Amino acid sequence: MEKSCIFPDFPHFLHGGDYNPDQWQKYPEILEEDMRLFKLANCNSVSVGIFAWAALEPEEGKFDFSFLDKAMDDIYANGGRVILATPSGARPAWMAQKYPEVMRVDESRQRHWFGNRHNHCFTSPIYRQKVAEINGRLAERYKDHPALIAWHVSNEYSGSCHCDLCRAAFREWLKRKYGTLEALNDQWWTAFWAHTYTDWSQIDPPSPPMGDRAINGLRIDWLRFAADQTTDFFKNEIAPLRKFTPHIPVTANLMGFHTSVDYRVLAKELDFVSHDSYPEWKGTAADIRHASDHAARYDLNRSLKHKPFIQMESTPSNTNWKQFNKLKRPGMHMLSSMQILAHGSESVLYFQWRKSRGAAERFHGAVVDHVGHENTRVFRDVAEVGARLKKLEEILGTVTESRVAILYDWQNRWALDVAQGFQMSDKKVQKTLQDHYFALWRRGINVEIIGEEDDFSRYDLVIAPQLYMTSEKLIGKIADYVRDGGEMLCTYMLGMVNENDRCHLGGFPGGKLKEVFGIWNEEIDTLYPEDSNRVEWRGKSYRAFDYCELLHAEGAETLAVYGEDFYAGMPAITAHPYGKGKAYYVAFRGEDEFLYDFIGSLLEERGIVSDFDGALPYGVTAHSRTDGETVYVFLQNFTAQPQETETSRVWRTVEDGEPVSGRIALAPYGTLILARKPGEPG
Amino acid sequence: MEKSCIFPDFPHFLHGGDYNPDQWQKYPEILEEDMRLFKLANCNSVSVGIFAWAALEPEEGKFDFSFLDKAMDDIYANGGRVILATPSGARPAWMAQKYPEVMRVDESRQRHWFGNRHNHCFTSPIYRQKVAEINGRLAERYKDHPALIAWHVSNEYSGSCHCDLCRAAFREWLKRKYGTLEALNDQWWTAFWAHTYTDWSQIDPPSPPMGDRAINGLRIDWLRFAADQTTDFFKNEIAPLRKFTPHIPVTANLMGFHTSVDYRVLAKELDFVSHDSYPEWKGTAADIRHASDHAARYDLNRSLKHKPFIQMESTPSNTNWKQFNKLKRPGMHMLSSMQILAHGSESVLYFQWRKSRGAAERFHGAVVDHVGHENTRVFRDVAEVGARLKKLEEILGTVTESRVAILYDWQNRWALDVAQGFQMSDKKVQKTLQDHYFALWRRGINVEIIGEEDDFSRYDLVIAPQLYMTSEKLIGKIADYVRDGGEMLCTYMLGMVNENDRCHLGGFPGGKLKEVFGIWNEEIDTLYPEDSNRVEWRGKSYRAFDYCELLHAEGAETLAVYGEDFYAGMPAITAHPYGKGKAYYVAFRGEDEFLYDFIGSLLEERGIVSDFDGALPYGVTAHSRTDGETVYVFLQNFTAQPQETETSRVWRTVEDGEPVSGRIALAPYGTLILARKPGEPG
Amino acid sequence: MEKSCIFPDFPHFLHGGDYNPDQWQKYPEILEEDMRLFKLANCNSVSVGIFAWAALEPEEGKFDFSFLDKAMDDIYANGGRVILATPSGARPAWMAQKYPEVMRVDESRQRHWFGNRHNHCFTSPIYRQKVAEINGRLAERYKDHPALIAWHVSNEYSGSCHCDLCRAAFREWLKRKYGTLEALNDQWWTAFWAHTYTDWSQIDPPSPPMGDRAINGLRIDWLRFAADQTTDFFKNEIAPLRKFTPHIPVTANLMGFHTSVDYRVLAKELDFVSHDSYPEWKGTAADIRHASDHAARYDLNRSLKHKPFIQMESTPSNTNWKQFNKLKRPGMHMLSSMQILAHGSESVLYFQWRKSRGAAERFHGAVVDHVGHENTRVFRDVAEVGARLKKLEEILGTVTESRVAILYDWQNRWALDVAQGFQMSDKKVQKTLQDHYFALWRRGINVEIIGEEDDFSRYDLVIAPQLYMTSEKLIGKIADYVRDGGEMLCTYMLGMVNENDRCHLGGFPGGKLKEVFGIWNEEIDTLYPEDSNRVEWRGKSYRAFDYCELLHAEGAETLAVYGEDFYAGMPAITAHPYGKGKAYYVAFRGEDEFLYDFIGSLLEERGIVSDFDGALPYGVTAHSRTDGETVYVFLQNFTAQPQETETSRVWRTVEDGEPVSGRIALAPYGTLILARKPGEPG
């Protein structure tokens, strides 16, 4: 395996962040000071121009690149590189005033007026044209600038627009998908409540406050359309970039499990993924689970393209937009920064370089505070991360190898989110995924978080909690995967509807899944929060809550049964050999300890182990990267207490090359980055 | 007394439910299977066509009755009968598109667009015309069909519309009611906040978000208008039915204490009442009170026309639209079904026969699940109810005799709901009624829940909690009732306003009520949730909460006084002989145990006893029906434990004719249906 | 000092309230009875006409003053006086119908329709003209009426309007303030998110639901504009009053810490302040803190013009618009009425004289209930207050002397309320002020609550909690005050932004404040509700919560340090001599006991003591007024228990002239009003 990093011409972990010289054009002394501090902070890169449209095009057709010319030159002169942003995340006031169509229309069909950000129409021809023009000018101007290493396209794409143009585009999208109204009516089951459409023009986006919310197929397709339209808008954004700078990779900064855009659709168009990461560290034991939840986000990002990504945003200290904006405790910034590296990042980047002087985000953490100098706790924390990154460069270009995957599809989640039934207001799809992930995280197992279009055969174990929406294609894929030797773990709600949210007939799980899993799920009991059941497995009793399915083993082996209620004795866990593989089914929502133990047994069955051989105390974990020869293990302590483990192997520390073996002490919030070649003795 | 059931030509308890063959027209094998399962489930009737307008009239003026022809024929061929629905609960997309006026306008005067259901304008001439036309075609086509036994008009009428047409109709309604603006201004007390109207066109419906919410008379009258307009719409619906099928009775399915329609107004136009019933059984001790609360709903339905009604909807298993949709525990479906019979139903009908394949209600319980066959727990539960119903047919046509009535008027409730004062957000009118009802339910006493236009003299005891709104006419009626020998129990808030929500002057309770009750209520103390007082009565101390009136006995006997706070020693319960009768007053909100004991003493005073003579353990109750000779007692156990009681009489079981006497064991969730002729020995 | 009361020609404490004869024109017997009761209740004044526009001008241009003529004459004939209201708080229906522009437009730019009150546009030329006309007619008609003693202008001004006229006026206001768009863009920091304005017409009011919420400067300026526009509207209202009745003082009834109007701006235009006071007495120990919180409101009112004010509204019993509307306990009405006198009121006035018969406020407490006679508990309570007021007239015209001031500016509060950061949803500015106030209230210290334009040098100690927004001018003023000998106590969040909500650069607190306080505040830790720290001071340990700043003493003396967390040992309290004065800084939010002790030490340092020398048990306090010679102390017991204290001086009771010395017993809810001349022995 040859190491290949995202920016081969700049083979360093990126360190830096969002830089807004457009806000400080009247403060030349501050722009100058920025450069001094840039080096002091051990930074090597910035993102520029993210919301700079008003500066770049102060009047329609009148452009002014002076601040940007200077920033590009200054950064380069100081040894740095620039990720250049397209400015479409917000538009100038003159544009909203002259072309109201660029502003978004909400689900009540009210057009919002100028203000805020991330609120433009994705369809508007004028907005697309304006975006293409400014992007083209940026690309043409800086195509040969040596500082330019990547494009940061727009910012945190999200949401959708209900304007006439979008509604028309939605209808066209539906025509392409279904061909005939008859097919659409059939899939959406519009005979229900007399919703049958007899003309395409009768179809409107769902609108819980003012229009339809009864047709689930409509709701899912609208969300799909919005994702497609976002991606189409993205393609319009990058066309001029591709033209002028075919050598420069493009990305868009994503937000983890953010629900309004299907990132799997968007990610196909990106050259690499970038991620905005804002964990909320509380300084308590709750940080352990929180670390795992964020690790899942990072793995999701890495898995979108199955390769390293960059962290585009994080805060060097506090946020300012959460309900409580607590300071990061000493050591936490390093721990948090090293964690994202452990999961595949090639950067530690911040929002923001310097706190703005006014408006919404001025109290958000930054490398440089309003005080303006380097003598702050936060600045020192940042500089320390920068210094460490330099010592870790041998890790650059390494990848993550995973034998375990968890299936997470946006469309399955949407379908459950809008489904009427079960626990109405929250099916907890994301939390449930993270519950399963936590069982693996605690064991130091690398995980990919994949979509249904990914190749399952790359994994020994695929876990798919609450896989409610299953097309015939996906059902076939699962069957093939297991038949060919894979191990699959599915849970309650498996296989209830097809890709258009229409129920499978003939019993759940739908179609061939019954055969693969050897079960029939007759009913699903939704429990009240105060209810619970018990399941005993391998001599230990676990709490079951929220959902308990009334399962029949039809071929499967019953591994455990319910201990209580009228379905006591019915199967709660089953296993079913199918072809060369095995299909496990868990019919209830179980407590963390159950998932830890049960998933542990599956790992054991498949011989899947952590790359770190020592015991992992609660709150300590280990994740690894590799270049195919050397294994790099990030051993991290997410507790505020010192922790210990013991290895039977011989490692070296990456930074210093010191040998490590036997007992290992971890400082509170400490990270040890260890390397070894598995072939070597020890 | 001659027994007369609702469908004398089909003298069976109806068993079946909402059947939607319009959704399955492309699945002939499923329509065929439906008939096999229909018989297997011991069903004998269905409701058809409730939301079938798009199927019946796929294009404007083009009708297609084929699916309905087949359904009517199929059901009849299988020995069943059909309750045929008019489809106005939802309209086809083409109609909303071509005639936007059919869609409802909300209180912010925004017209909603196509989607959902139950959201049409009640005034729109076009909608009324379209409804009349489709209803007429249905009636004409099926008038002689032997399957047709009743009309199910529209579905769950509710809500109101604020369109220009409705606003104009409201003004006309007001003109008819008040004659002059002067009279209206006077009753509504519009001099307050300079609201005096000088032209009818100045009057608009209340609108908390955008318009007026200060004038209580306006708010009450708007709700009355909406009820009247709903009823007027109903009359338009049934005109063609009356024309073509004068022999077929009509109903509308009601929803118990649903607040947006005054069912007493609508019920006058119905031939019989039907009820949609969705108790939320939790499988805990909370089910006991819940059973009582639903019994009150059933009694309300029966009392609307003082005769048996049918259950039009219920779920054979779970719902899908509550926050938590738990399965019914084994036995609960039978218990719940028998309960509504105990309170006067002549049917057990379900929403829905078969789960739809898509859209909002596909996960709602049904006789036939997506699995499609009969081998499910739910199907067996349904078939068992059907089998039992057949054995109970001697009960058909019997009635309920009640010596006790509780007064519940929609308009009184509305007035309290919108009253500024007391506990602002919830006066708990319905809960308070149900608290009083529970005291009677636990004692196995039959109750009617009557309105102020009903004949009080039919009852020995009339209970009227929180009877805040009292017209002069009602005051006179109460006085007459008591004077002529009736016993009346009233509570805090009695007689504060007239029928237009204008306060009585001269002290509360208003007018002659002071004389009838012999009291003056000087002030009403509203307590915080954490506050309470105590009232000792007959040597037992009870908690008083929420409301404590500072009462003066002016002629009445003081039965109990407050034990605490600055009004300790003031009367809390009074009794006042008036004419041949007696008027009781309870000045505070008391705990359940108080109501149980105190109402028990009133029953004892009047010699009112349950038709079942045995003791009723907590959670066990008994309600009866009679044909004038034989008394049928439904002895029901709403607990998950076995229970026991003992009778000193000799009964027989209705199903098997087995003699029952002495100790009686009740299974968990068990129902025993006993009969005896009171004249007989035992 | 010469005593001068607000109404020198009617030298009595006003006692009476809102009188609405316009509602009872058809009830002459009630109007007559009102006069009998007026005298019986020991009343001497009323407010009339507050919402009487529909009565005064039933048709456009047709006026009818008959009811008002009669009311003015009747009251005068009974020895009373009238505060005459202008009716602009609500407009007649005909006006809203004919001139929709008078109705307010909300932040979603929806014009509300007729109804409610307090919802007119402050800019509408038509409304201003109509108001000027009716006000002029009232003034001209009654200018010589001997009953007229003051003008009650409109009612409880509040809110703002987003109509086109208001938006245009806002832009003009901005032009006047900033001169150029460049200056505005600079202060508002609009480069952020590309918000730079290039034309004044691009600026719209903030609108969280539909428009901008990102620019803090915009939000603050909009609130300032609304306050200015309200005041401008007020000036339009009083122009005709000044013309016809230059001898009659004008007021507007204010609502304490109400946030939508900056009362310091409005108060400049008032001749005297009046206050609407609605404490929510619970009858529990919570009443103690509640009494202090309301004392702060009264002091705020008095401080607006540094002279006595009147209570314009209060309830003689319960309210009807709170969530729970509990009765006042016996004694509480007297205690509450005496309290506002203790803090500078020259009246006890009620909303309302008589309960209206219908509409929103009919269940609000009143002197005369629906029962209509005087034999009620509430009537007796009112009459008793009236009788006592007559005996206290020697106190009339006395003033309050305070050596301590707390700084409270509406604009600072707005800035914190809309700031993104810290605890997002509530910075608790008002509560924090009241926390500090409570420490003084418990010690019986008179306090003024001043604004940043007030003269600080009048006070020995100025306390300014959370003084986040500091203009250069204010910074200079603070520096001067301390330098010249003042003592200042500031807290966390001091000096972060300028008057346009733009951050100070160079470290917090901004500018010269660092020098005055001798500190640098590096970071602010926002704690979760479950978090806390500890600060030990003078051997006692206190809880710190919500906010803990990471402070550096740069010249200041560290009085206490944090006991926990990573900033243990950093300064938590500092003191810094500056010039002749001293600047204290508290870096954390502390519990009440800390504020009580710490502020106590500052009082001690300055020799500030209560005018009452005895110990004050918890719940007992003493506040004073003086004519420059005699000191009048209101010794009040806000507990439901008897309390005791002891004085070493000799006092006399004001009502009876009885000597008081040594041990003093206070009845539950009791008030003792004591007088002495400090020069006298004892």
Image (tube, coloured by chain):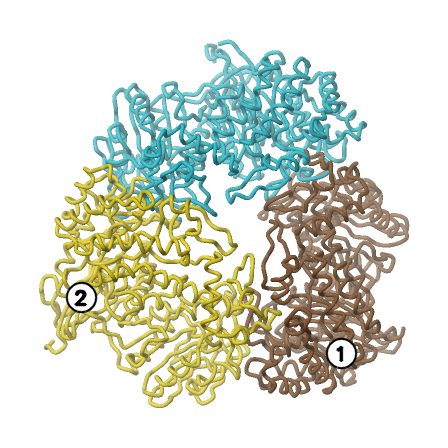
Chain colours: A yellow, B brown, C cyan
Q: Is residue C267 visible?
A: yes
Q: Is residue A638 above or below residue C300?
A: below
Q: Which residue is mark 1?
A: B13
Mark 1 belongs to chain: B
Which amino acid, by three-letter code, is at mark 2?
A: Cys
Question: Decide: marks 2, 1 in contact (CB < 8 A)?
Answer: no
Circle 1 crowding by C-alpha within 10 Å: few under 14, some 14–19, many from 20: many
Mark 2 and mark 1: Cα distance apart in space: 76 Å
Q: Which residue is mark 2?
A: A5
Quadrant of res B374: bottom right
Circle 2 crowding by C-alpha within 10 Å: few under 14, some 14–19, many from 20: many
**Residue situated in front as seen by the camera: B342 or B275:** B275
- A315 relative position to A436: left or right: left
**Residue situated in front as seen by the camera: A538 or C104:** C104
Quadrant of res B635: bottom right
* Secondary element type, mark 1: loop
**Residue situated in front as seen by the camera: C592 or A162:** A162
The label shown at residue B439 is none
Residue found 15% across the figure and 52% down from its top = A80
Q: Is residue A248 above or below residue B555?
A: below
The mark closer to the camera, 2 or 1, is 2
- Percent position (x, y) of residue A639? 27, 59
- Percent position (x, y) of residue A283? 31, 54
Which amino acid, by three-letter code, is at mark 1?
A: Phe
